[in-house]
């Protein structure tokens, strides 16, 4: 299971939604989130060009992350019956210079010079890890091509004497490259086997929940409490007769607590406690809190004082292996934090 946005993205988004803007760490967290957002938006933008390729039986996987001996992530993998392609996506604009001797990328924009890691080195390292993984899993190796692709139309590539210039491309050239490779390589796998490989890789996708609060030295007391109204965003809504009531605009909701529970799961390494949830949602009793968490579909682990609740989709994405026996579970929950019907 690969979520629409990475777990890192979701963690930063959850923290920004709960952290007051006047907090001294807010600007730094916002800047980091913007960088993550730009990166994922650039990766998403490549999907348009991939879809333009006039090649049948292609399978695309975005943001695959595998926990191998060394964890590795690949922006895009293209699986074809006769070949494979890895794309390292960059969203830079401005003038881009490649230095082969220093293995460095330099950007000049508005009079400012910045340096970055050579993306060709990045994608080659990803391929080395993927190849090792395939060998260990006894997956057939096919010719695999690696490219650094720049999707921002305002980028100016200055390659000069860069030896791997043919592997530094723009998004517009992606369809033509895939069509050229399809003509070059005969079919080695059936379409069914290719789809099975795609599903196998997706099943091995694994992300991590980092201790983001500890990283920025943020206390739970620093965060905004209470359920925000889904209509006017004012806090807190109050709990009345199994519903949430907004005192400001009168909006009522039965599931306004879902996004907050999911945000807390992201910030707590997917271990919700009844005391913390009660404190955040301004609930009157621990028993009412337990029922609310259960009805929201969270899975219960542990016994007595060691009890905690986990979001089932986060368990799948992070491949969590609890040492506790599962006690009970509620309804299934989607990655957005809303109950599936």
Image: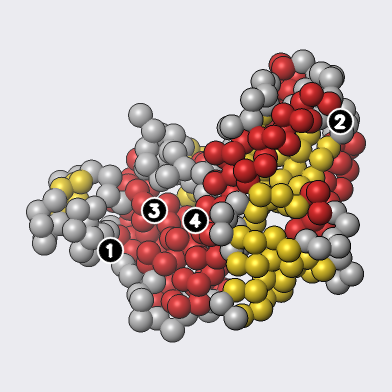
Q: Which label sits in the foreground, 3 or 4?
A: 4
Number of numbered discs visible in the structure rendering: 4
Task: Give the residue at x 22% y 64%.
Answer: 235
Say which of 191 and 15 sits in front. Answer: 191
Say which of 119 and 266 sits in front. Answer: 119
Tell me the CA gap for discs 3 and 4: 13 Å
Say which residue label 2 marks: 142
Say which residue label 4 marks: 10
On the rendered structure, is 108 left or right of 185?
left
Q: Position of residue 69 (x, y in %)?
A: 83, 51
Looking at marks 3 and 1 on the same chain, the residue that comes earlier in the sequence is marked by 1
Q: Neighbour class for label 1 at 10 Å: few (<14), some, many (≥20)?
A: many
Q: Position of residue 57 (x, y in %)?
A: 68, 21
Q: Which label sits in the foreground, 2 or 4?
A: 2
Question: Is disc 4 in contact with disc 1, using a CB cutoff of under 8 Å?
Answer: no
Q: Position of residue 330 (x, y in %)?
A: 42, 36
Question: Is disc 1 in contact with disc 2, using a CB cutoff of under 8 Å?
Answer: no
Question: Is disc 3 in contact with disc 4, using a CB cutoff of under 8 Å?
Answer: no
In the rendered view, tell whether residue 4 sits above or below residue 105: above
Q: Which label sits in the foreground, 1 or 2?
A: 2
Q: Neighbour class for label 2 at 10 Å: few (<14), some, many (≥20)?
A: some
Task: Give the residue at x 88% y 43%.
Answer: 132
Say which residue label 1 marks: 226
Say which residue label 3 marks: 261
Rendered image coloring scheme: secondary structure
In the rendered view, tell whether residue 252 sits above or below residue 233: above
Q: Neighbour class for label 4 at 10 Å: few (<14), some, many (≥20)?
A: many
Looking at marks 4 and 1 on the same chain, the residue that comes earlier in the sequence is marked by 4
Q: Is residue 308 visible?
A: no
Q: Neighbour class for label 3 at 10 Å: few (<14), some, many (≥20)?
A: many
Tell me the CA gap for discs 1 and 2: 54 Å
Quarter in which the C terminus is drawn: top left
């Amino acid at each position: 299971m690969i979520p629409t946005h990475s777990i890192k993205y979701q963690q930063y988004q959850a923290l920004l939604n709960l952290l007051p803007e006047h907090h001294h760490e807010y600007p730094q967290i916002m800047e980091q989130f913007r960088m993550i957002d730009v990166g994922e938006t650039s990766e998403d933008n490549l999907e348009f060009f991939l879809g333009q390729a006039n090649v049948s039986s292609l399978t695309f996987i975005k943001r695959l992350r595998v926990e191998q001996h060394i964890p590795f992530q690949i922006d895009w993998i293209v699986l074809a019956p006769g070949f494979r392609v890895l794309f390292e996506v960059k969203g830079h604009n401005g003038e881009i210079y490649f230095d082969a001797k220093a293995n460095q990328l330099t950007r000049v924009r508005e009079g400012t010079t910045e340096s970055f890691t050579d993306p060709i080195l990045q994608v080659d390292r990803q391929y080395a890890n993927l190849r090792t993984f395939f060998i260990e899993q006894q997956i057939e190796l096919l010719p695999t091509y690696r490219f650094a692709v720049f999707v921002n139309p305002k980028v100016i590539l200055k390659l000069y004497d860069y030896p791997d210039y043919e592997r530094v491309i723009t998004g517009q050239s992606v369809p033509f490259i895939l069509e050229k490779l399809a003509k070059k390589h005969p079919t080695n796998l059936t379409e069914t086997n290719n789809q099975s490989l795609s599903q196998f890789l997706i099943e091995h996708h694994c992300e991590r929940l980092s201790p983001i609060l500890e990283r920025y030295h943020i206390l739970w007391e620093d965060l905004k409490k209470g359920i925000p109204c889904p209509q006017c965003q004012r806090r807190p809504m109050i709990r009345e007769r199994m519903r949430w009531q907004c005192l400001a605009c009168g909006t009522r909701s039965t599931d306004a607590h879902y996004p907050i529970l999911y945000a807390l799961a992201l910030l707590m390494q997917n271990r919700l406690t009844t005391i913390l949830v009660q404190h955040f949602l301004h609930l009157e009793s621990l028993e009412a809190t337990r029922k609310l968490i259960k009805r929201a579909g969270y899975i219960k682990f542990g016994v007595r004082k060691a009890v905690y609740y986990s979001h089932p989709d986060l368990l799948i994405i992070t491949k969590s292996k609890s040492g506790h026996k599962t006690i009970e579970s509620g309804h299934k929950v989607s990655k957005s934090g809303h109950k599936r019907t």
